Image (tube, rainbow, N blue to C red):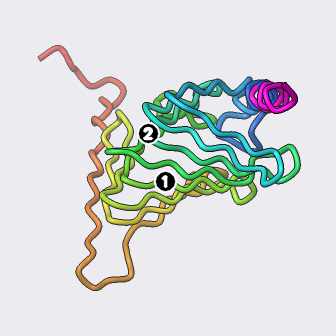
Amino acid sequence: MWLADTRYALVLMLAVMPAAAWGLASDRNQPIHIEANSASLDEKTGISIYKGNVHLRQGTLKLQGESMTVHFSGDQISKILLSGNPATFVQRPDDNDVDLHAESGQMEYYATDERIILLEAARIWQADGKDFRSDKIIYDISSNRINAGGSDSGDRVHIILKPKPKQPESGEDTSQ
């Protein structure tokens, strides 16, 4: 009975606790919703493991994968490890009207550093045409910076940047 009550308390705590420093400022104040085929919560170690079609949602943040391990430090999330084929991330950055999308075989989210590391066929893109691909991508959430490329000489970074449509100059006839 005590173990069931402890698990219920941990699940409830995880569902209502804001994650430290995720994306939109308003996202941080939203409850975390997690769905999975199975969950294992260990209060002593501060580690929760979710397996099978895992979905995490907090405001505009959405994570999906096959397995997710959440590490707590006190009552705050310190690290999330997500794997899938692919694992996916979607979030609306502050001061932006398009979502940022990411996918890779493995994702490591570090809450304190506000950083996501994407490994194995990593990709970050937005609907406006920006597209980054590499075997390793580090995304700094707070500064909206991307650092791509691996340490091996064969690793290549692929970037697509689409030009913005030319705006007509004032007085220019655009009726043609």
Q: Nearer the viewer, residue 10 or 171?
A: 10
Q: Amino acid at mark 1?
A: Met
Circle nearer the N terminus (2, 1) = 2
* Residue 86 found in image quarter: top left
Disc 2: CA contacts within 10 A as few (<14), some (14-19) or many (>=20): many
The relative height of residue 172 versus residue 139 in the rendered view (above or below) is above
Real-space CA distance between mark 2 and mark 1, rounded to the nearest whole angstrom: 9 Å
Q: Residue furthest top?
A: 175
Q: In the rendering, at what x and y percent does residue 107 appear?
A: 49, 53
Image location of residue 72, percent across then percent down? 77, 50
Left or right for 171, reference 18 = left
Q: Say whether marks 2 and 1 touch (CB < 8 Å).
A: yes
From the viewer's perspective, is residue 5 above or below residue 124? above
Which residue occupies the foreground of this view, 90 or 37?
A: 37
Query: Can you tell which quarter of the image residue 68 is in?
Result: top right
- View extreme (bottom): residue: 153
Residues in magenta, as a range: 1-11
Please name which of the two marks, 2 or 1, marks the residue nearer to the observer: 2
Above or below residue 20? Residue 143 is below
**Numbered circle sitting on residue 65:** 2
Tell me the tag on residue 107: 1
Q: Dot 1 lies on which element? A: strand
Secondary structure state at the residue bearing disc 2: strand
Q: In the rendering, at what x and y percent does residue 151 appear?
A: 38, 82
Q: Amino acid at mark 2?
A: Gly
- Residue pictured at 46% horizontal, 30% vertical: 98
For this orientation, the residue located farthest to the left is 176
Q: Residue at x 84, y 25 (%)?
A: 1
